[in-house]
Image (spheres, rainbow, N blue to C red):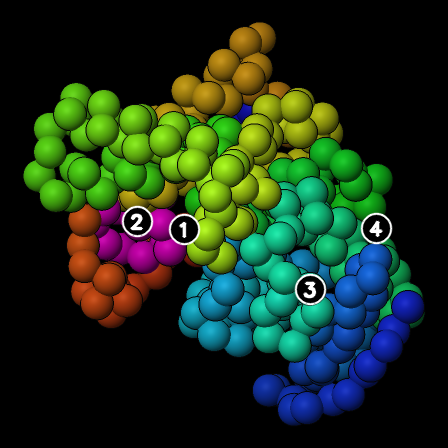
Amino acid sequence: MRFFPVLLAIIAFTPIQSIAQDLLRTNITFESGRFTLHGELLLPQNSDSIPMIIFLVGSGENSSHRTIYKDFVEKNLEALFIEEGYGILYFDKRGVGDSEGRWQRSNIYDRADDAKAAIDYLKTINSVDTSRIGVFGHSQGGWVAQVVGSLYRNDVKVIASIAGPVYDAELHLTNIYNSEFICEGETKEKAFEKASKKAQSDINWVSVFPLKKAWRQLKEISDFDPANDLRRITDPALFVFASNDHMVYPGWALTTLNETFPEGVPDNFTLSVIPGANHDLKNAGMCTSKEEADEAFYSEYFQTTFKSWVLNHL
């Protein structure tokens, strides 16, 4: 295990624009099972043997590289890796944007299968170096990247889980509620007690009456535990946590990894905790308002650490 220092078949191929003289941004579609998924492909022009990054967004019906992730991918992927000769593939989840299906009916393994379909799509492009494909995911997308690294390790060179949980769905929900109660002024002990009860109640409730879209999705993932998938990852894997993350506590994550690997976290895992960063890797506190956090800058420590690891492993 490495630990960075811590302070604490092609369906459509339609060019839409060139954002730089040597970069082509293209609308794409590909098939995943019975669904057609839509996305974008960024490739350096007049290049061969291009290493590729596939990016997986987080949960929710609005999660897309075109909307709430637009700023994130522009500053933490495109600005860091395009100039280094990497290509990037984005795609909308099932039921998001023009992609077919329903996101709330998809579980983590469905999303991993969609990522595999994206990998298979890249294998049809002659200029892509298919031995250098990395799958990176943020938040729930980090869970998905972990499963890709487990099930499809022969198809990827590296995976990266960015602010992604490494524990089961109930503990993840407890984590989220715990932050809410702490930010409302509860003591740590009382917050955890209330969060645990609420998470367990919600998990039980959605299994019987998943009335809302978000609850239907929770039902699909309520029994997910990445432990077995984590044990099957053999490729280089980066796990990024943020010290002020309200959804994935670094302490809980590192404890879980030590419990998952009692003989030691594998040498192919690199763990990094980004000081002063929130769930979106911005310089903001855990309880900072969304409006203030949106105005914050992305952590340069994260960008430097992330870029260095990718250049060394992909």
Q: Quadrant of the N terminus?
A: top right
Characterize the magenta stretch by its predominant secondary structure: loop
Mark 3 vs mark 4: in front: 3
Q: Amino acid at mark 4?
A: Ser
Mark 2 crowd level (few <14, some 14–19, many ≥20, 10 Å Cα): many
Task: Give the amino acid type for the residue marked by disc 2 in the picture.
Answer: Ala
Q: Which residue is mark 3?
A: 101
Report x, y in % for residue 224: 58, 33
Q: Which of disc 3 and disc 2 is earlier in sequence? A: 3
Residue at image coords 43%, 36% = 205
Does the CB distance between marks 2 and 1 fall below 8 Å? Answer: yes
Disc 1 target residue? 302
Q: Who's the residue at 45% across and 55% down the image?
A: 212
Badge 1 amino acid: Phe
Q: Is residue 277 magenta?
A: yes
Q: Which residue is mark 4?
A: 131
Question: Which residue in the structure is indicated by mark 2?
Answer: 277
